[in-house]
Image (tube, helix red, strand yellow):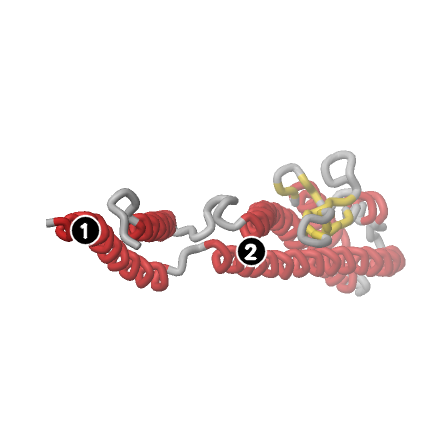
Amino acid sequence: MSSILTNNGAMVALQTLKSVNTNLTDTQNAISTGKEIGTAKDNAAVWAISKTMESDIASFEAIEDGLAMGSATVAVASAGAEQIVEKLVEIKELLVSAQSENVDRGKIQTDIDAKVDQIESIISAAQFNGANLLTSTIDGTATEMGVLASLDRVGAGGTVTSVDITIAAQGFDSSLDLATNLTSITDTTSAASALAEIESFLQIAISGAAALGAASARIEDQSMFVADLVDSMTLGVSTMVDTNMEEASARLSALQTQQELAVQSLGIANEAPQALLQLFQ
């Protein structure tokens, strides 16, 4: 049935045009912003997941900065410990040479004293941003340093717990107190005693340097893992919410064509009542 009061064709055409215009606006927004899901109303579930992941990404980026700071601190201490080992080896060489009868032990002791002073200088100077891992207390009070390494989340919205890498202070200022505990050489007997003592000191320094080297390697590995994790999480969020530009471009062209057709259909439908009037002429 046709009616000049109610134009069913025009109503259908108008609803079609409104739907096409809505889809066209959404597609244009997705292209201009680069986000297919930019607000909660676009897709509440995916938007909530993406925001949780984005907060974790921001946290891991902060962890990367903390790991870099920790790595620098440990690297300084590790370099100092390795230098100390070298100085102790040099002292050991001097003590071995002091075992001979026809040597100037006074000059040898002078060389040893200079190297002992150098070791003390290295211990006190091996600090980064106020933290010294070679002394008994890292910052005057703490005996170990924690470096935030990761965040563990249980479930999508579960509890988040932090994971630290702990590096202990090596205490070289007390365990390597050569000025007090290393025997001064005056003869072969004292030289032999000093040689046994320096061997003990050397093992302490080697153990400390090895511990710092292991901690440095662990921090470096964790830093690489966190960087890869941030990249993977960023890619995951992008897959969920970013606009597929190739697909959006094709959809935009199709919707523009549909819009033109819908406008034409509405025009045709609006002319239908005029055709009805011709029936009465």
Please name the residue shown 73% across and 40% down the image: 138
User: In terms of depth relative to the viewer, which is nearer, 106 or 232?
Assistant: 232
Q: Please state if 53 lies on the left or on the right of 265 as rendered.
A: right
For the residue pair 140 and 17, the one nearer the viewer reads as 17
Q: Amino acid at mark 2?
A: Val
| Residue 230 numbered tag | 2
Q: CA distance from mark 1 to mark 2?
A: 67 Å
x then y, percent, for residue 130 = 65, 37
Q: Indicate which label's residue lies in the foreground, 1 or 2.
A: 1
Q: Quadrant of the N terminus?
A: bottom left
Q: Residues within 10 Å of mark 2 (few under 14, many from 20)?
A: many
Q: In this figure, which residue is indicated by the disc labeled 1?
A: 276
Q: Earlier in the sequence, mark 1 or mark 2?
A: 2
Q: Amino acid at mark 1?
A: Leu
Q: Is residue 36 left or right of residue 9?
A: right
Helix, strand or loop status at disc 1: helix
Above or below — where is 184 with respect to 92?
above
Q: Residue furthest front?
A: 280
